[in-house]
Image: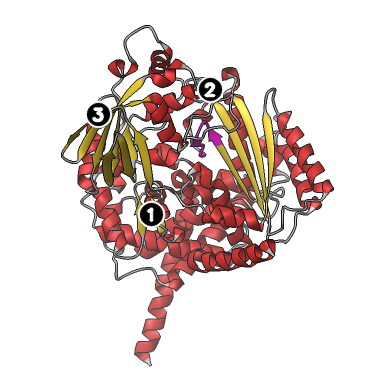
Amino acid sequence: MAYANDLILVGDIFDTWHEDNYPDEGKGEAFEIFCSELVMKQWDLSIHDVIQGIIGGGNDGGLDAVYTFLDKELVGIDHRALDRKNARSFDQPKITLVLIQAKQKKGFEEVAIDKVVSSCRAFLDLSKSADDLAQHFNDDVVEQIDIFRRLLRNLAAQIPSVSIEFKFTTLGSTDNIYAQISNKARILESDFNSVVSGATGKVSLLGATEILELYRERPKTAFELKVDEASKSGNGLVVLASLRDYFNFLTESEEPTSSDGDVEPKLLSRIFEWNVRDYQGEVAVNKEIRESLLDQESAPFWWKNNGVTIVATRVNLVDKTVSVVDPQVVNGLQTSNTIFETLKDLAKDHPAFNQMILIRILMTDDEDRRDQVIRATNRQTAVTDASLYATETIQRDIEQFLLGADWYYDRRKNFYKNAGKKVSRIIGILSLAQSLMAAGLNRPDDARARPGSVIKKDEVYRSIFDPGIPLEVYLWVVESQASVDSELASKIQDRATRNNLRFHALTALTTLLAGRTVTSLNSLKSIAKRDNLPTDTNVKLAVETAHTAFTTYVSTSGLRGEAVAKGRDFIAYLNSASQAASAASTSAASTVDAGITNA
């Protein structure tokens, strides 16, 4: 009874989700996104990050999504550690590979897991090159798997810990798993364990009941922090708390659980979403923090550490317990992560838990004040301007303008996702930047291959996020990208090709409409108006032009589609084809107009 009801409820939930978010996707592809978003919930990924990992389609090796993490950070195609020189800065890194298969079937099929076993043996064989894999698997699969393989090789000298997880998701029941499935799961785990010395593998079978449980999980918004001393001033508190209590606050646990315990503690990464830095791992400053945590002979820890700053929408102090609603650690990420990484491996009675930490807790729901705090508290040490972009006025202005058109600009990662907004209407800073590079800078190759590294260059950022550009240009680009994506989904079945083409098709669209190559967002002002969105005819022609140019270039060059999309050489060919299509379209329209006039 329970399973049968869970199955019906999951079906209803998915149908609503599908209709609200990705109606242009087929049910199978939408189910892959739906399950991947739920399965990856523990990693606090944005919907943009979830989509980037989807690789299902032809020649997918039995997998529907692939994600690689370095420590707790999702590794994208231009992550700094994928450069061998930069990789040397990581010390004792942890690499995690997550593989997902999502099937809308009411059971776990042996043939499905057999396919994954066979594919993974090829994927994880480092003697095979990416070109070798490309002979059997699609571009998206090769790209995502190659991230893991390159990371593994680049970090080899740092002796990384490696874990590989396979999530097999169906609408079946996990109450009675066939012995053959369990045996194949153990075989796959054994293969994962043998990738490198010390690697660990885990296979999880998730059915309708588990999917429903994942869906019902909602981020907690109210937390409690026990403190030893507290001083209140206005809407702020300055407190001293033991590291035991701060550890519990960071892990949402009642008692610290170390490696001696039964449950591995998990850091609440979502309370760091507004912090401008990523955790830097075992860099020098964090090694010093760790040493001072464990040093029981010198001055107390809180004397030597600046502590942390937390902003929240509500704060209340009662009997040395602070209730904090919607907390965000805006300064002190390195300290907090180092505290977590150090204490989680210690026995519960270790004296380090008795050390104290200084914490400032500020209550405000005013975005300007919150951003002022973020910028001020992160100027104490070197932080790149790129890390502080989210606090700029232009970013807040874009957010407010897009809200008027029912688009949610997620300049603070997962803010709107956690608020329950439709994920298909959420746009992140990086996602918008990619579309802007393609539409306004004639750089779809960078948008496809190097989005993170390119936007960190201040001259690129300032050229696309310029206060002098009318806000309606940003809305026009968002709407145009959505139209292009919709047309690609309806016309091209192969997901890898759509992924390679989405930015190039947008470049083709702006070239068609302008009648020339567009190399600055200022050049878009004449056509990119709120009341002048591209017509269906324009979008169809742009997608057709880009697709034809792409397939022709791939065929004649002998290169893989991924290499063409990421390379600069194809752009001139695309621009020429788009300008020719624009001229032909204008000529045809003039002929029609002349015919109407003569009639």
Secondary element at tag 3:
loop
Mark 3: amino acid: Arg
Query: Which image quarter holds the C terminus?
Result: bottom left
Q: Residue at x 57, y 43 (%)?
A: 563
Secondary element at tag 2:
loop
Graded by Cα atoms within 10 Å as few (under 14), some (14 to 19) or many (20 or more), the crowding at tag 1 reads some
Q: Label 1, on which residue?
A: 416
Q: In the rendered image of this protein, does residue 199 appear above or below residue 104?
A: above
User: Which residue of the protein is positioned furthest toward the right in this rendering?
Assistant: 180
The dot on residue 513 is none
Of residue 510 and residue 374, the one placed in the foreground of this image is: 374
Residue 462 shows up from this direction:
no
Q: Residue at x 46, y 56 (%)?
A: 576
Mark 1: amino acid: Tyr
Of residue 522 and residue 195, the one placed in the foreground of this image is: 195
Residue 280 relative to residue 496: left or right: left
Graded by Cα atoms within 10 Å as few (under 14), some (14 to 19) or many (20 or more), the crowding at tag 2 reads some
Q: Label 2, on which residue?
A: 345
Q: Nearer the viewer, mark 3 or mark 2?
A: 2
Query: Which image quarter holds the N terminus?
Result: bottom right
The dot on residue 379 is 3
Q: How has the structure been colored for display? A: secondary structure
Q: Position of residue 323 (x, y in %)?
A: 32, 42
Q: Position of residue 271 (x, y in %)?
A: 39, 40
Of residue 392 and residue 244, the one placed in the foreground of this image is: 244
Chain part drawn in magenta = 69-77
